[in-house]
Amino acid sequence: MIMSVIIDAEKRLFTLHTRNTTYQMKADSLGSLLHIYYGERTDESDKSYAICMKSRGFSGNPYEMGRDHSDYSLDVLPQEYSCYGTGDYRISALKIQNSDGSFAASLQFKEYQISRGKYAIPGLPAVYAKEEEADTLEIILEDLVSEVEVQLLYGVLFENDIITRAVKIINRGADRIVLQKAASINMDWINGDYEWLTFYGGHARERNIQRDALGHGIHAIGSVRGASSHHYNPFAIVCERNTDENKGACYGFSFLYSGEFLMEAEKDQINQTRLICGIHPDNFEWNLQPGGQFDTPEVMMTYSSRGFGALSRNLHKTIRQNICRGEWKEKRRPVLINNWEATYFNFTGEQLVTIAKSAAELGIELFVLDDGWFGKRDDGNSGLGDWFPNEKKLECTLKELAEKIVGCGMKFGLWFEPECISEDSDLYRKHPEWAVMIPGRKPDLSRNQLILDFSREDVQDYIIGRLSSIFEETPIGYVKWDFNRSICDKYSMALDMLSQREFAHRYVLGLYRVLETLTVEFPHILFEGCSGGGGRFDAGMLYYTPQIWCSDNTDAIARLGIQYGTSFGYPVSAMGSHVSAVPNHQTSRITPFSTRSCVAMAGTFGYELDVTKLSEEEKKMVRQQIGRFKEYYDLIQYGEYYRLQAPTDSQCTVWEMADPEGREVLVSAVYHHVEANVAPVIVKVQGLNAGASYRMSLNMDDMGNIQGWRRKWFEEHMPYGYKNEETITGAALQQCGLVIPEALENYQAWQIHIVEV
Ligand code: DGJ
């Protein structure tokens, strides 16, 4: 049994080891908990010698150090959890307003505790692990004046190279205090020039990558939209300048939180870098009465000295195994068809059953009825909140419809948007006080809808009750949980004046309570998260919904970039991805059918088009695609993911899924356009056994549109290695590379299966 926490009690030195990384901190003579090291695995010797003590003008000195210690300043020392107001002028983790109105905290080491297993956080998502897989270190700090106790929690998952952090703040004093900022993590680097990768975007173009130098000044990303947002993902990578996919040092920080967040970094006067991540303080305050406790959400950290690829794989594995929960964590997920882009709001019950029948004949396993099945809902302007089936439109009860679909041999799934309410709804007419708005002001509308006040327990209970009745009455196997606007006018009629700034966080806690109750109560239901696509694509949501609709943009070429960016922080098994019709509804682009399926297979895989309108040839292709997806299922969903060529810097995006033993690999390549007389695309395959021999097969179904002499010519001129009898060694494929066949048409995709012989 490996104990990954090593403590030198006398020196008050704490070292955390994972298989490839080490993290160290130390309480100094004043009791300040200093951060010393995080990076490549090393020993547990005291590395605090590397912290240079030197007097810096205008960087003050704690009173307790006396007159002779002008070299000791909190303004330049690397810290584990920095405080606002007491001599550290950099961005800080904790800002408290004390009962006397002052803004000050100063934390001193009190004690520590180690335990086997991974801590949990009440009411919040958190990485979990078997007792033998993780250790927890708890370091307790206190502010002697206000008697506030701060417990720093560290969860160490040795094999995954993951360290998690969260903070518990307890008011042990006699007076109320107010938390104005309570970040989840403070990370200080005492030297180095860093850059960071952040993931920005908007609706239908999520998670583009931006790489910026962390030069002097404050750099920040975040969300004040009530949800984690399309605009900045709550995930960032801090790296050294030369770091790329396969080499160099990098640190990943993934926030397990679905609400407003702030990730900020500052390079200070002596070139040290600090990163702070937590709930966004703009719309946050928490009143802590005597004895009260506040738990911050968790940050999951990982370090890799082997570039972004290894970093992503650490996160993929941990999200799959230690964040996603429930029956569907390991279970094979069904190939689905969703009616949204096939019908939008305009459908009849009969039409749905016809689509479902036709889909079932093609091998599709789950039919999802999207928006428009309830209340008065024929467009986006009304009905939200009225979660009662529209039997006139369905031409039967919901149960009967579900039974007809189940009768076709499929599972039945249903769309909900439980957190929203239309002004034109019975629920709003009955409970206007349940809508989020500021009394006396007109609310900001978005998609003509309002937010339901999930910070209220009565609202949470109502939604739990309403959805539970539908789940109990109807044979439902899947739920799409959508959320289609940002939150402003933040105000709850159930909170008093002093607590209004608690609203945004209370909303997220309410959402988590509802999701926890429903997912535990109905474990057979596969929940898919969604927020206008990927507007709430975060590791917090994945604790409740093991997959999330990646984007409302279903264009295969646009998806290359969206899924590429998403893959830095999240596994393929989390990315909802569908084959849709052409011209594409978001971009009007026309791509080959095989390209659309190749891209959707880098996700949970399904269809979102009217299958009754497909040609016989296309229907044949659907059957082949499903067969192929099922054949490669384990490789795709549980394999090691490698980004071989980025959509941004080449003519062709290439990625790979490898079985962890290196016996089988699926390489997928999609050309961004077709060109005459192009240079060949050669990629270095990864994760193979160097000494083993491999046979490669090119999927000729991907030549769907290419017939006649071109097909014949292509088959005769196959690049080296694709002829059946040939084998190539792993070493050759890894070092010399694999030749990707050229594009024969615009947006050509190839899937190459490589198997050890
Ligand atoms: C936004 C989602 O992302 C779409 O897939 C669809 O469910 C619509 N909402 C329905 O209103």
Image: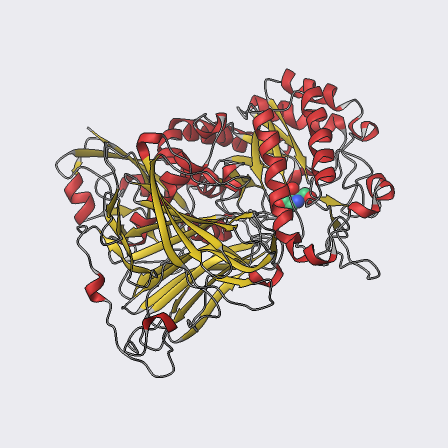
> Measured from the top left, where is residue 325 in percent x and y?
47, 31
Residue 477: quadrant of the picture? top right
> Measured from the top left, where is residue 225 in percent x and y?
62, 57
Q: How many marks?
A: 0
- Residue at the outermost right position: 429
* Residue 615 drawn above or below residue 12: above
Left or right: where does residue 430 sit relative to residue 113? Answer: right
* Residue 601 drawn above or below residue 7: above
Quarter of image, ligand 1 = top right
The C terminus - image quarter: top left
Nearer to the camera, 194 or 123 = 123
Nearer to the camera, 223 or 246 = 223
* Residue 252 drawn above or below residue 339: below
Nearer to the camera, 399 or 608 = 399
Q: Residue at x 25, y 73 (%)?
A: 53
Nearer to the camera, 384 or 267 = 267
Q: Is residue 30 visible?
A: yes
> Measured from the top left, where is residue 557 in percent x and y?
48, 51
Q: Is residue 707 visible?
A: no
